[in-house]
Image (cartoon, rainbow, N blue to C red):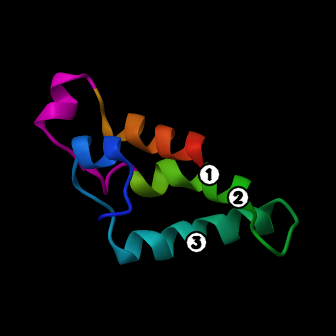
Amino acid sequence: NGNSPKYVKDWVTWGAGPRASQYLVMAAKTRSIIQGRFTPNIDDIKASMLPVLRHRIITNFSAEAEGISSIDVIKRVEAEA
């Protein structure tokens, strides 16, 4: 994607698809309801990112050579959100 940060372009071979976005929203909504809120916020999204996305993002050889995992990429995206 042309809008992706450089590190994503450099390290990710396969990104999350449309269903991942749907599950991320569902997880954030569920978390907000569990915490007694009717509307999710950015903290709900951030808390849901790792469990929803870690198995959907595949890093490439460059990332592996640098010791970067899909979890590292997700945490960096989360930190920049």
Q: Which mark is residue 25?
A: 3
Q: Residue at x 77, y 65 (%)?
A: 32
Q: Residue at x 37, y 77 (%)?
A: 18
Rendered view: 6 above or below 63: below
Amino acid on which disc 1 is placed = Lys
Structural distance between the alpha carbons of marks 3 and 2: 11 Å
Residue 61 highlighted magenta (yes or no): yes
Q: Residue at x 41, y 55 (%)?
A: 53
Q: Secondary structure at mark 3?
A: helix
The quadrant in which residue 79 appears is: top right
Q: Which mark is residue 42?
A: 2
Work out which quarter of the rendered image holds the N terminus and state it. bottom left
Q: Residue at x 33, y 45 (%)?
A: 6
Viewer-side residue, 22 vs 79: 79
Q: Dots 1 and 3: beta carbons under 8 Å? A: no
Magenta span of residues: 54-67
Q: Which mark is residue 46?
A: 1
